[in-house]
Amino acid sequence: FPADQESTVFYNPVQVQNRDLSILMIQLYAERKALRNAMRQKRKELLSQKLPKDKLQEELDSYQASLAPQELVKENVETSGITILEALAASGLRSVRYWKEIQGVQHITI
């Protein structure tokens, strides 16, 4: 790495795999959070209809099977998006990737 240039940013190419894994895990978290919120809302809706317990579970299972978690994240970014704290950010490279590559990010704090 060139150390004599003042404007260069330290970039560790060994960390590429780590950044990729971080993005995958945060995306999975966002999808599961959106799915959990959708299921909670549907359960409240069905409970208000006073369905029998077996019918309720059947309805919930069919509803869950019909959901696409990635689409839920896109649709609900305003209400149930995620906030990321990047406490150890140096150049902000990981944060930029989070913002560009993870669906459902509302805010990143560096």
Image (cartoon, grey):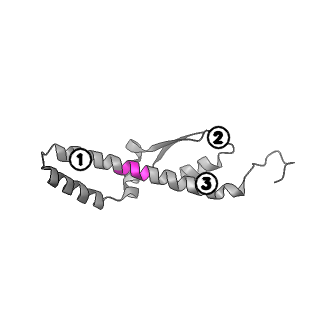
Q: Is residue 32 visible to us here?
A: yes
Horizontal placement of 25 versus 68: left or right? Answer: right
Q: The disc labelled 3 sits on which kind of residue?
A: Arg
Residue in view at x 59 percent, y 52 percent:
97
Q: Dividing the picture into quarters, in which one does residue 59 lie?
A: bottom left
Q: Is the C-beta separation of discs 3 and 2 under 8 Å?
A: no
Q: What percent of the width, then of the height, locates residue 48?
A: 16, 42
Left or right: where 67 falls relative to 12: left
Label ID, residue 88:
2
Q: Residues within 10 Å of mark 2 (few under 14, many from 20)?
A: few
Residues under labels 2 and 1: Cα distance?
39 Å
Q: Quadrant of the N terminus?
A: bottom right
Q: Amino acid at mark 2?
A: Leu
Q: Residues within 10 Å of mark 3 (few under 14, many from 20)?
A: some
Mark 3 or 1, nearer chain start: 3
In the picture as drawn, the residue positioned furthest to the front comes out as 54
Give SS at disc 1: helix
Reading the image, the residue beneath label 1 is 43
Magenta run includes residue 75: no
Position of 5 compared to 19: left or right?
right
Secondary structure state at the residue bearing disc 2: loop
Q: Which residue is mark 3?
A: 19
Q: Which is nearer the eye, 40 or 93?
A: 40
The residue under the point 56% across, 50% down is 98
Residue 18 locus on image (x, y percent): 62, 55
Please report whichever mark, 3 or 2, sits nearer to the chain's N-terminal start. Answer: 3
Give the Cα distance between marks 3 and 1.
36 Å
Q: Are discs 2 and 1 less than 8 Å apart at CB?
A: no
The stretch of residues the image draws in magenta is 30-35
Task: Tell me if residue 101 can be seen.
Answer: no
